[in-house]
Amino acid sequence: VHVLAQAEQHALAGCAAGRAQATVPLAAGEDRTGVALVLGSKRVVTGRFVDLVTRAPVPGVRAQVTPTAGAGAGIPSFGAEGAGADLSDAGGRFTVHNAPGGLAYVVGLNTDRDARWPLVRWIVELTDGAVQDVGDVPMVERRGGADDKPGDFGWSFAQTAPDADPRTRALTISAVTPGRPAATAGLVAGDTIVTVDGHDVQGLRLELGWDLLQVSAGATVKVGLARGVERSVTAIAVD
């Protein structure tokens, strides 16, 4: 690996035997050689896409697996060996080949653009082993019609550092707009949402929270807060 730049650079390598990544700090104008990349074994990931509430299988969803951080983040794994197997079947089952290890996103993208279950990003921890079954991957049914006006709660959330451990992430409110639904319901800056409509949205389940909060104007959600109270908030139309 030969890199010439300032700040951090990510190196990624992959072959049939495995894949590896490394973060290399560089000073301005510095050359770096001799970076060792130790290949980690690839694995086959299986699972099942299901509806969050009914647990019914969701077919027709294309599965990908990508690291949550580092050089391989955002680079999906499909695997030619499993041609077609990454598309969930009638039972919601999928198979992804050549997947990385460690913390990774299982991403499901529905092939039907008008589907009631459009997208999911679910974090799993993949350990050593040739085959890993991640179990059920819950998908949130679209909350409102495709033509409905998107809802607004009048809150903003604190940004998470790109290198933050996903297990420690939280939906912490950084600001509320006076007179908007969140403020009217009694939410304040610094509140952390731990449940949405009874579903845990902490840490590795935070992506579920984002999906549950994507609602149309007029929809009401119940949020549980870390301070031990629940509040119902009704979205209004985005200005």
Image (spheres, rainbow, N blue to C red):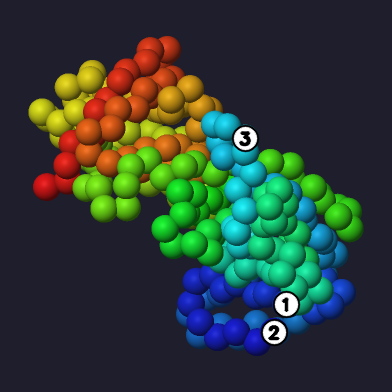
Earlier residue among tags 1 and 2: 2
For label 2, the crowd category at 10 Å Cα-Cα, with few meaning under 14, some 14 to 19 and many 20 or more, is: few
Q: What percent of the width, then of the height, locates residue 80?
A: 76, 76
Are the residues at dot 1 and dot 2 in contact (C-beta closer than 8 Å)?
A: yes
Cα distance in 3D space between marks 1 and 3: 38 Å
**Label ID, residue 1:** 2
Are the residues at dot 1 and dot 3 in contact (C-beta closer than 8 Å)?
A: no
Toward the viewer: 13 or 98?
Answer: 98
Q: Nearer the viewer, mark 2 or mark 3?
A: 3
Are the residues at dot 2 and dot 3 in contact (C-beta closer than 8 Å)?
A: no
For label 3, the crowd category at 10 Å Cα-Cα, with few meaning under 14, some 14 to 19 and many 20 or more, is: few
SS for dot 1: strand
Q: Is residue 143 above or below residue 4?
A: above
Q: Residue at x 55, y 51 (%)?
A: 121
Residue 81 shows in the view: yes
Displayed quadrant of residue 66 = bottom right
According to the image, label 3 marks what residue? 55
Earlier residue among tags 1 and 3: 1
Cα distance in 3D space between marks 2 and 3: 46 Å
Q: What percent of the width, then of the height, locates residue 202?
A: 52, 32
- Tell me the kind of residue under disc 2: Val
Q: Residue at x 62, y 35 (%)?
A: 55
Q: In which quadrant of the rendered image does the N terminus lie?
A: bottom right
Q: Nearer the viewer, mark 1 or mark 3?
A: 3
SS for dot 3: loop
